[in-house]
Image (cartoon, helix red, strand yellow):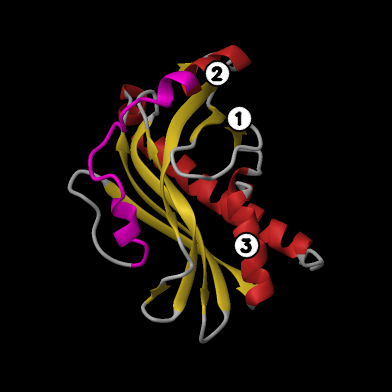
Amino acid sequence: MIKLRKPSGRDIERILDSSREAEFNYPFTGVTRELLVDGDGPKGFRLNRFTTSLGSGDEVFEAAKEAIDSWQMFNHSMASLHPVGIDTSLQTCVAVLFRGYGLWILNPARILYRLSESSLRDGRVRQFGFAYGTLPGHIAKGEECFSVEIDTITNEVQFRITVISRPGHFLSWIGGLIMTREQKRFRRLAGRAMKSYVDLKLGVEPG
């Protein structure tokens, strides 16, 4: 949904209600699970990966897991999440509200898988997180995985975003470069928000 005015609470509820039974607006659902570190995205979709260090050790990893489950990557000025306080269980529907260039953009999505730390990646990396896929009305088509991981050998903890996407609205086709720039900005802000949460949780003074 794209509007010149901020969507009302009723607008948001209507989008969420219609999204709960809607089909995803793209094929290849779940593909980001296999693309976290390497590999190529599906034909016609742009693949982007973003990582940032959160620190090291089990305490950092536990705080990072809390940050993921409380959607801290959206705790910044660029976006707001609806409904507030929603959990990250499978099939949960959310609507992410962005504002930019004089427009309000409400993007519906649904959580389609979670990453369990019980299985190691490459025999050494514990992972935790989830991915959501886009639904009709989203300005893009694709999915986004938000995860944290700890290397059991080095103890380094990282926050990772893995995305496949393509334009889903004529405005995103026209403003392709702007959309790409805004996506990069969101990932930077998400990384900072995650780091801020972890540092605050552990009593680390801001650098």
Mark nearer the N terminus (3 vs 2): 2
- The residue lying at 60 percent from left, 60 percent from top is 65
- The residue lying at 78 percent from left, 63 percent from top is 206
25 in the magenta segment = yes
For badge 1, the amino acid type reads Pro
Residue 146 position, x and y percent, is: 48, 53
Judged left or right of residue 205, residue 48 is left
The answer to whether the residues at label 2 and label 1 have Cβ atoms under 8 Å apart is: no
For badge 2, the amino acid type reads Glu
Quadrant housing residue 178: top left
Residue 136 position, x and y percent, is: 35, 25
Q: In this view, does 59 lie above or below 108?
A: below
- The residue lying at 63 percent from left, 48 percent from top is 70
Mark 1 crowd level (few <14, some 14–19, many ≥20, 10 Å Cα): some
For label 2, the residue is 13
Mark nearer the N terminus (2 vs 1): 2
Q: How many labels does the image show?
A: 3
Q: Dominant secondary structure of the magenta stretch? A: loop
Report, in whole angstroms, how far the alpha carbon at label 2 lies from the one at label 1: 9 Å
147 in the magenta segment = no
For label 3, the residue is 64
Mark 3 crowd level (few <14, some 14–19, many ≥20, 10 Å Cα): many
For label 1, the residue is 83
Q: What stretch is highlighted in magenta?
A: 17-37
